[in-house]
Image (cartoon, rainbow, N blue to C red):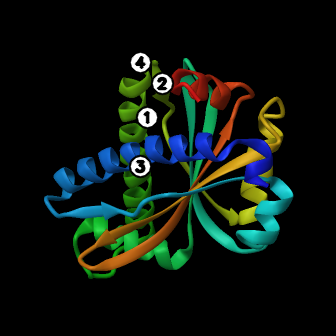
Amino acid sequence: MMEDTYTHLQIDCLREVVNIGGGNAATSLSRLLNKRIDMTVPIIEVLSYEEVYTSIMAEDKVVNSVIMNMMGDGEGIFVFIASMDATESLAKMMMQSDEEVSDEIKNSALVELVNITVSSFLNAISKMIDANLITSIPFKITDMFGAVLSSVYMETEYFDENIMIIKNEFSYNGNRIETSLYFVPRPGVLEKLFKTLGV
């Protein structure tokens, strides 16, 4: 469980950092779309992979995911997860239209949204802790939830056995769109962050 891994103070500080990063991402999206985009205060949990499958989402649920590597002074992988319904809503938000569009355009809109969100998020955090954090080019996968997380974990076997869940909702035109951003950190990355924050 989260409290067995990190203290409540550490999680509270982390939530504030993520909240600032999320606010920066929402501002970037709002400027791009010329419409107000809000993001809720994030829910943060640190769980083992087994706990993720039992308490967050079933392994066999088909989802759209966008994956981005974090590099520089800290390493890890961001995995953005959206259900098929949420993908549809996010695409309409990005396209600012309720008209039906092709799967290719939906996928492109989702990838661009995640690119802006994660890049803006890391840019805000980089300035806050005076670190150089950069991202790779995003790529999209449609597969079962368990297969997505397992492939990330297997390809980065030196990463932590726990996974961080940053659960947010986008709010656009009064409609909330539930999504989750997962972060798989390289060992020591979060500890370095907590040391910088003095917790």
Q: Which amino acid does label 2 sit on?
A: Leu
C-alpha separation, residue under disc 2 versus residue under disc 3: 17 Å
Which element carries disc 1, helix, strand or loop?
A: helix
Rendering coords of residue 35 (x, y %): 16, 63
User: Of callouts 2 and 1, which one flags the residue occurring earlier in the amino acid sequence?
Assistant: 1
Determine which residue is flagged by label 3.
19
Rounded to the nearest angstrom, the CA distance separating label 1 from label 3 is 12 Å
Spatial CA distance of label 2 from label 1 is: 6 Å
- In primary-sequence order, the first of circles 1 and 4 is 1
Would you call the spot at circle 4 few (<14 residues within 10 Å), some (14-19), or many (20 or more)? few
Q: Distance between the residues labelled 1 and 4?
A: 11 Å
Q: What residue type is labelled 4?
A: Asp
Q: The residue under label 1 is which amino acid type?
A: Leu
Kindly identify the residue that appears in the image at 45 percent across and 40 percent down: 17
Q: Which of marks 1 and 3 is in front?
A: 3
Q: Do the residues labelled 4 and 2 touch (CB within 8 Å)?
A: no
Front-most of residues 105 and 176: 176
- Tell whether label 4 touches label 3 (CB within 8 Å): no
Residue occupied by mark 2: 133
Question: Mark 4 highlights which residue?
Answer: 130
**What amino acid type should be assigned to the residue bearing mark 3?**
Asn
User: Residue 122 shows which numbered tag?
Assistant: 1
Q: Which of marks 4 and 2 is in front?
A: 4
At x 78%, y 59%, the residue is 147
Which mark sits nearer the N-terminus, 1 or 3? Answer: 3
Q: Which residue lies furthest to the left in this view?
A: 34
Contact, mark 2 vs mark 1 (Cβ under 8 Å): yes
